[in-house]
Amino acid sequence: MTSIYITQGQHAVGRDADMVVSTILGSCVSICLWDPVAKVGGMNHLLLPDLQRENENMTAGAVDMDQLVNRMMPLGAERPRLRAKLFGGSSMLSGRTDIGSRNVQFARTYLKNEGIPCDAEDVGGTKARRLKFWPATGVARMMLVEESVPEPKVAKAVEANDVELF
C-alpha cells in the first residue's frame, strides 16, 4: 500500500489501486476529485482559498484547484467526467472568524462554477476530521476526531509591581 500524507497547500494524484491519500482537517477543506472512467483521482488540502495570490488575478484556491485538475489530465482524466467529494470546514476557534465556513463556501462555489458535481460532503461542525481517499476508486473514508474544540480561556490579570523596564 502506497500511503501519501498531505498538509496545507499540498495535493496528490494517482491511479494505482494500492494508493491512499490522507490528511487531517480542521477549518481547512479537502476536495477529492475522481474520474470514474479513467479511474484517476486526486485530493488537496486548502486553507484560506479565497485569498488573492500575489501577482495573479485568481484566488489561491482556484490556482490550487487548477493545479490538481491539470496533474490528473496526463493520467487520463477528462474535466467533463470529474466528480467531487468535499470535507472539512470546521469552526475550530470558538468566538473567532469562522474560517471553516469561508473555506466551504469557496469549495462549493468553485465546483458549481466549474460544473463538477459534488457526490458527497461532510462539512462544518466543531470537530477535526481524519480523511483517507483512494484515487483509483474514488472511495473516501472520513472519521471525526472526538476531542471537542476547547473554549478560549481568558488570562487572569497579574498584579504589577513598580519596576519599570526600558
Image: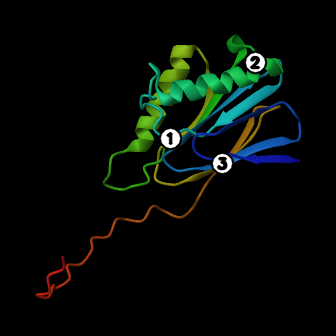
Give the crowd class for mark 3: few <14, some 14-19, many >=20 residues within 10 Å: some
Q: What residue type is labelled 3?
A: Thr
Q: Please state the horizontal and vertical placement of residue 120, each as a whole percent of the image.
A: 62, 32
Residue at 42% across, 49% down? 91
**Can residue 83 be seen in this snapshot?**
no
Q: Please state the horizontal and vertical placement of residue 51, each as a whole percent of the image.
A: 42, 32
| Up-down relation of residue 12 to residue 108 (above or below) | below
Answer left or right for 98 relative to 26: left
| Up-down relation of residue 109 to residue 158 (above or below) | above
| Up-down relation of residue 113 to residue 50 (above or below) | above
Residue pushed farthest front?
A: 166
Give the crowd class for mark 2: few <14, some 14-19, many >=20 residues within 10 Å: some
111 or 161, which lies in front?
A: 161
Nearer the observer: mark 1 or 3; the answer is 1
Residue at 72% across, 24% down? 71
Q: What residue type is labelled 2?
A: Met
C-alpha span from label 3 to label 2 = 23 Å
Give the crowd class for mark 1: few <14, some 14-19, many >=20 residues within 10 Å: many
Task: Read off the residue under disc 1.
Answer: 47
Q: Which of marks 3 and 2 is nearer the N terminus?
A: 3
Nearer the observer: mark 3 or 2; the answer is 2
Task: Read off the residue under disc 2.
Answer: 73
Q: Which mark is residue 149?
A: none
**Can residue 71 be seen in this snapshot?**
yes
Q: Residue 23 carries which label?
A: 3
Q: What residue type is labelled 1?
A: Leu
C-alpha span from label 1 to label 3 = 13 Å
Q: In which quarter of the image is residue 64?
A: top right
Secondary structure beneath label 2 = helix
